[in-house]
Image (cartoon, helix red, strand yellow):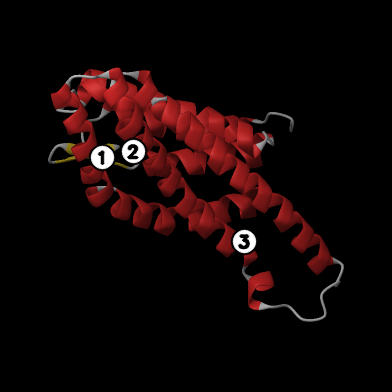
């Protein structure tokens, strides 16, 4: 790990503060859209993960798990403070926290792999090992950041829906609850996935680029 500096503490403190702000202020980090909540927290999750890696040199997988846990805790707290029709689902850590920790692990692992590839490409470019630079070699960081952003939204949706669809009826075996879980899974997929994916793809790559410039 790098030596902890005031700037490192400040940047990570600001991200955690924004997490808390988005969690505690109604309709800021979790926006009510009918019976579902559109979240912006996955954007903070991936920015926080990348910032923790760049500033403190924490392993990306570990950073992903840490901020996945923070993400899950904000989901739990949000439902406790501002319960809605789905509060009975997300006050259970099995649906609010565990999927986000698994998401953090998977996204962190993908980012870790891409970071290793980036280091190799960067080293070869620096030592002029490439005769011709292809489009990919010129824009590999942008490409990787787009894939990481897409993976963040996809894994967040995937794990939450898988837990709800397959485990929800086992935890709440009443027939009306089982039918609700299956119907609600499709509602989330139809209403949340696309806008959440678009937002993280638009926001994360330029922020990641700025953070990398700041700490490279």
> Badge 1 is on which residue?
185
Residue at the (52%, 57%) spot, across then down = 147
Tell me if residue 129 comes above or below residue 97 in the rendering.
Answer: below
Viewer-closest of 3 and 74: 74
* Number of marks drawn: 3
Name the spot of residue 17 as percent of width and height, x first: 42, 29
Disc sitting over residue 141 in the figure: 3
Residue at the (64%, 77%) spot, across then down = 135
Which residue, as the protein is rendered here, is positioned at the far bottom? 132
Tell me if residue 132 comes above or below residue 212 in the rendering.
Answer: below
Q: Is residue 91 left or right of residue 4?
A: left
Q: CA distance from mark 2 to mark 1?
A: 6 Å
The label nearer to you, 3 versus 2, is 2
Which mark sits nearer the N-terminus, 1 or 3? 3
Q: Is residue 204 left or right of residue 4?
A: left
Residue at the (48%, 37%) spot, across then down = 103
Q: Is residue 129 left or right of residue 31?
A: right
Viewer-closest of 76 and 126: 76
Residue 104 visible in rendering: yes
Quarter of the figure with residue 98: top left
Q: Are the two marked residues, 2 and 1, in contact with CB atoms closer than 8 angstroms?
A: yes
Secondary structure under the numbered disc 2 in the rendered image:
helix
Which mark sits nearer the N-terminus, 3 or 2? 3
Q: CA distance from mark 3 to mark 2?
A: 30 Å
Name the spot of residue 100 as percent of width and height, x first: 44, 32
Q: CA distance from mark 1 to mark 3?
A: 34 Å
Residue at the (58%, 58%) spot, across then down = 144
Secondary structure under the numbered disc 3 in the rendered image:
helix
Name the spot of residue 39 as percent of width and height, x first: 30, 40
Disc 1 crowd, CA 10 A, few/some/many (<14, 14-19, 20+): some
């Amino acid at each position: 790990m790098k030596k902890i500096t005031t700037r490192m503490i400040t940047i990570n403190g600001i991200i955690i503060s924004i997490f808390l702000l988005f969690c505690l202020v109604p309709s800021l980090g979790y926006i009510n859209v009918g019976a579902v909540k559109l979240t912006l927290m996955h954007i903070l999750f991936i920015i926080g993960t990348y910032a923790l890696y760049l500033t403190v040199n924490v392993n990306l997988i570990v950073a992903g798990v840490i901020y996945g846990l923070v993400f899950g805790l904000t989901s739990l707290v949000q439902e406790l403070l501002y319960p809605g029709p789905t509060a009975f689902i997300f006050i259970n850590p099995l649906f609010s926290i565990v999927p986000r920790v698994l998401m953090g692990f998977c996204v962190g692992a993908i980012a870790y792999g891409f970071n290793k590839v980036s280091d190799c490409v960067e080293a070869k470019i620096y030592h002029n090992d490439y005769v011709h630079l292809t489009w990919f070699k010129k824009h590999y960081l942008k490409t990787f950041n787009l894939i990481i952003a897409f993976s963040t939204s996809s894994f967040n949706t995937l794990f939450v829906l898988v837990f709800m669809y397959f485990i929800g009826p086992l935890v709440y075996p009443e027939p009306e609850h089982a039918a609700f879980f299956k119907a609600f899974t499709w509602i989330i997929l139809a209403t949340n996935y696309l806008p959440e994916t678009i937002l993280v793809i638009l926001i994360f790559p330029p922020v990641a680029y700025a953070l990398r410039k700041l700490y490279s």
